[in-house]
Image (tube, helix red, strand yellow):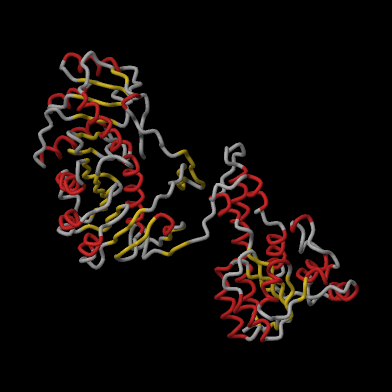
């Protein structure tokens, strides 16, 4: 065990006072001199505990409306001095600088202020200068100083004070220094991303403070961790912890259902990030029944999501199915009790939270970053390519199918009829394979494709797909267009009474 170091003094300067009182009382009990300033100083005095104002040390008041309080050689000299360095010790004596052994800092809430929609000047004022400087100085000098840089670390620090009576080992101080640099780097990344919101500086910085170790990754032999604030998006009502694969499927489900936000009751069932069932109806019960009919085999162990509250009638039907996760904006009390009937079934209430507008994934020795595909095809975007016009019902079904297609792995073909997913061909290496697979699948579940529509995530370079679709009974096609051989597909459709519209937007999902 390394030699213990006894703390004799502490500087405390925090924004939030939550959880601070027991630490202050313990420091006082241990006879540790406390230095502070501003609101923190008043907080400590109000506890009836003696505190030395920083102004008494520096002989300078807080100036510039509080922008400058602790930025002074007598403060930073007290933190940065090397206690085993003869020259440093002499200078502290010469300039009457007090030695500081503990620094407790809580930074201004920059990210919360940005998220609140505050005015720019209010945001700028929440860029901490003194606090971040204190953190860096104390963490740099971890050989002699303990730096507590977050409210989240108060409990651990208080436990350390209680266990070791104000003594610390080098390993303790180094651990808190690592935590401090984690806080400071995250803080600076948030500030940079605010100033670089338009992306003028071609630099990538992403920081997440919350990491949750998962049972394993995609497979049991892989380690997995989720970095993010899951609780900001969901309230988990019931069930086991989500796995790596659960999280990927939940992400896919949420992004897909976002396309149907505010629309008639819509229910989707996903498996391996792709929809295997989806329907829109007048009631959520019927939407679920018809979504399940799309592929009751793949639905086993799937992820279920609704765009409206799940009621008891729907819950009774869901309860008959083995499924991993059920997501909805709310559950009736009766539905919640029914669905809790399976111990491991995960129930999530999705909150009204704006989803990220970009996507990040690892690639080779770096990362790929792109804007999320936020374009949703709408009727006003459609350009009629054929002399055959689509009916209103076909137009509605094509938009419905296009939304599903956008969230299905490429190459894909989606077949839909009467606001119900009949089948899709997902992740195929050729578009013909995707189509033939989707037709075979639809027929295996007794769907009549006569009058159905087809959506494709990319253009048709040859007329083979529209010919196969037409022979299966499909009467309308939605696709981006853009092939130099578009006319071949258009001509076939004209000759075989098939309507075709083009969106001008490709929706690849790799």
* Above or below: residue 52 compared with residue 304: below
Return the residue nearer the eye: 433 or 56. Answer: 56
Q: Is residue 86 left or right of residue 459?
A: right
Going by the picture, which residue comes out furthest to the front?
46
Q: Residue at x 47, y 39 (%)?
A: 370
* Above or below: residue 181 compared with residue 103: above
Return the residue nearer the eye: 303 or 38. Answer: 38
Relative image position of residue 338 (x, y in whole percent): 20, 63
Going by the picture, which residue comes out furthest to the right?
94
Q: Quadrant of residue 133?
A: bottom right
Relative image position of residue 129 (x, y in whole percent): 71, 57
* Above or below: residue 247 compared with residue 150: above
Relative image position of residue 163 (x, y in whole percent): 58, 85
Q: Residue at x 41, y 54 (%)?
A: 233
Q: Is residue 488 left or right of residue 380?
A: left
Q: Is residue 231 left or right of residue 426?
A: right
Relative image position of residue 213 (x, y in whole percent): 42, 64
């Amino acid at each position: 065990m390394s030699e213990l170091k006894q703390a004799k003094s502490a500087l405390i300067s925090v924004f939030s006072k939550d959880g601070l009182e027991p630490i202050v009382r313990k420091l006082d009990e241990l006879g540790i001199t406390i230095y502070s300033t501003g609101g923190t100083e008043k907080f400590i005095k109000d506890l009836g505990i003696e505190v030395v104002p920083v102004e008494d040390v520096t002989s300078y008041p807080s100036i510039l409306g509080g922008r400058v309080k602790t930025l002074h050689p007598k403060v930073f000299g007290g933190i940065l001095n090397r206690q085993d360095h003869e020259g440093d010790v002499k200078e502290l004596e010469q300039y009457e600088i007090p030695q500081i052994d503990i620094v407790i800092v809580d930074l201004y809430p920059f990210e919360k202020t940005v998220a609140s929609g505050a005015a720019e000047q209010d945001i700028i004022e929440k860029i901490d200068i003194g606090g971040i400087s204190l953190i860096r100085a104390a963490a740099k000098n971890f050989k002699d100083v303990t730096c507590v840089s977050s409210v989240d670390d108060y409990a651990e620090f208080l436990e350390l004070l209680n266990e070791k009576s104000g003594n610390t080992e080098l390993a303790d101080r180094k651990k808190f220094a690592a935590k401090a640099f984690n806080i400071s780097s995250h803080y600076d990344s948030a500030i940079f991303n605010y100033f670089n919101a338009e992306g003028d500086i071609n630099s990538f910085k992403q920081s997440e403070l919350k990491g949750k170790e998962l049972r394993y990754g995609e497979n049991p032999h892989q380690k997995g961790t989720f970095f993010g604030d899951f609780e900001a998006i969901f309230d988990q009502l019931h069930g086991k912890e989500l796995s790596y694969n659960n999280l990927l499927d939940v992400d896919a489900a949420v992004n897909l259902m976002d396309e149907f936000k505010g629309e008639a009751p819509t229910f989707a069932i996903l498996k391996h990030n792709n929809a295997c069932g989806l329907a829109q109806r007048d009631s959520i019960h019927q939407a679920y029944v018809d979504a399940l009919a799309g592929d009751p085999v793949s639905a086993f162990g799937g992820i279920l999501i609704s765009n409206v509250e799940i009621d008891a009638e729907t819950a009774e039907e869901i309860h008959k199915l083995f499924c991993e996760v059920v997501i909805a904006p709310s559950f009736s009390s009766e539905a919640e009790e029914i669905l809790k009937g399976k111990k491991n079934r995960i129930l999530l209430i999705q909150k009204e939270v704006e989803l990220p507008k970009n996507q990040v994934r690892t690639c080779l020795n770096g990362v790929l970053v792109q804007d999320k595909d936020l374009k949703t095809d709408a009727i006003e975007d459609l350009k009629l390519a054929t002399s055959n016009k689509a009916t209103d019902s076909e137009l509605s079904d094509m938009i419905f199918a296009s939304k599903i297609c956008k969230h299905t792995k490429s190459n894909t073909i989606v077949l839909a009829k009467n606001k119900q997913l009949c089948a899709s061909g997902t992740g195929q290496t050729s578009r013909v394979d995707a189509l033939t697979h989707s037709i075979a699948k639809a027929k295996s579940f007794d769907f009549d494709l006569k009058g159905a529509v087809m959506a494709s995530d990319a253009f048709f370079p040859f007329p083979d797909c529209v010919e196969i679709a037409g022979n299966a009974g499909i009467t309308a096609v939605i696709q981006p267009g853009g092939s130099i051989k578009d006319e071949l597909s258009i001509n076939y459709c004209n000759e075989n009474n098939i309507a075709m519209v083009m969106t001008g937007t490709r929706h690849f999902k790799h």
